[in-house]
Image (cartoon, rainbow, N blue to C red):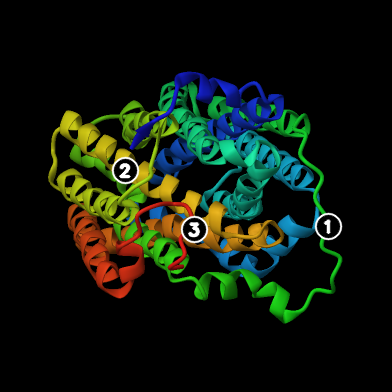
Amino acid sequence: MVAIPPDSVATLFKHRSFAFFWFGRAATTSAYQMLAVAVGWQIYAMTGEAFDLGLVGLVQFVPIVAMSLIIGQVADRFDRRTIARLCQIIKALCALMLAFGTWTGWLNREAIFAILFVIGTARAFETPTLHALLPGIVPPALLPRAIAASATAHQAAAIGGPALGGLIYVFGPTVVYVTCTAAFVAASILVSLIETVPRPVDRKPVTLASLLAGFAYIRSRPVLLGAISLDLFAVMLGGVTALLPIYARDVLATGPWGLGLLRSAPAVGALAMSVVLAYHSLDRRIGDLLFGSVAVFGISIIVFALSTSLLLSLAARTVYGMADAVSVVIRQSLIQTRTPHDLLGRVLAVNSLGTGSSGTLGEFESGVLAAWLGAIPSALIGGVGAIAVTLAWMWMFPALRRLQSVAVTREE
């Protein structure tokens, strides 16, 4: 990695729109993470079933897949700020409904799943849209560092959000959900203040080819296909988020505060790594770094699966986050530097389909396995599976393994 002067990172925040983007992303991520802690603990306290924790992921997975073909089209054809703002408003209304339902006592298991489905739909549109905003906010020369700095917003919120949610839960889930509502509203205001470089709007008729353009583009480029599918299968097999309420209460003998710390720990590692990557550009042996990071990701899951110590579990989850941050920055940089602007929304929608579905489907998979085999075997299988995927993808995508730089090379 090559060092970049500290004032280069500060330069990002001289762009007011990037500052609004950064704080808006931090606000929406914090709110979602707080909400996830409250919902996870509330569902497990309500039913005591590992399978229901898996369903939390499944109901958020369905809209990502069901709408995958239109999400990219919407992001490429309409004002991305408007889309992102609308998503925040929808999530704020959902959080308010969770608060009201909990306070009045009518909120049951089925109502929670229905509300989570709506939140999952909003997030399905929000994620690729926010990523597609970046190229119109900062100059191209600052884009790789903007991606890394944007990741710090996500990770800082993923640290504070779960921890704060776990602490506030002492006063009841209603207080958590009201706090989430306020944060989503703040995010919608911040997104509204962003100014972007005007871009031509695609007015061509929507055809099957245009709907599938993102998939076709990725399929024609082995480097992108390998990077996106590697993350998809590694995270799907290695996801243990759904199991955290079980680990917190039954394995590590803690309360909601322990669950909050377990959810925060990966973000601590990811934030630390994102800060490093914001100051140091990755410019060599990118393929080795990508595969190495996913292998470490798998090893950390195995350590977590076997741990009965809260401190060791937190350490394993921290390493998990550090490894994931390297993978995320490399993948996002590869996509942003190799995709034409008019296709970016559709390509990022496919990427979001992979990353979003892998996380939520992974929660369902781990919940089902936990209901069948127990939480510890489920987590252990996930870690071993992530390592197996890494080895298989090194053989299947040699061009990705040999990749030296995020910049496009003649060989590609």
Q: Are marks 2 and 3 in contact (CB under 8 Å)?
A: no
- Left or right, 313 with respect to 199, comes to left
Furthest residue toward bottom? 208
The numbered mark at residue 201 is 1
Question: As drawn, is 11 to the left or to the right of 223?
Answer: right
Q: Earlier in the sequence, mark 2 or mark 3?
A: 2
State the residue lying farthest toward the front. Answer: 410
Q: Which residue is identified by label 2? A: 244
Question: Which element carries disc 1, helix, strand or loop?
Answer: loop
Residue 337 spot, x, y in % from top left:
55, 53
**Mark 1 or mark 3, which has the lower sequence index?**
1
Please state which of residues 298 and 222 is positioned toward the viewer in this rendering.
222
Amino acid of disc 2: Leu
Q: Is residue 55 above or below residue 18?
A: below
Closest to the camera, between mark 2 and mark 3, is: 3
Closer to the N terminus: mark 1 or mark 2?
A: 1
Question: What is the CA distance from the residue labelled 2 to the residue labelled 3?
Answer: 40 Å
Q: Is residue 222 above or below residue 272?
A: below
Residue 8, visible in the rendered structure: yes
Percent x, y for residue 367? 34, 58
Q: Is residue 100 left or right of residue 85?
A: left
Where does label 3 land, which residue?
Answer: 408
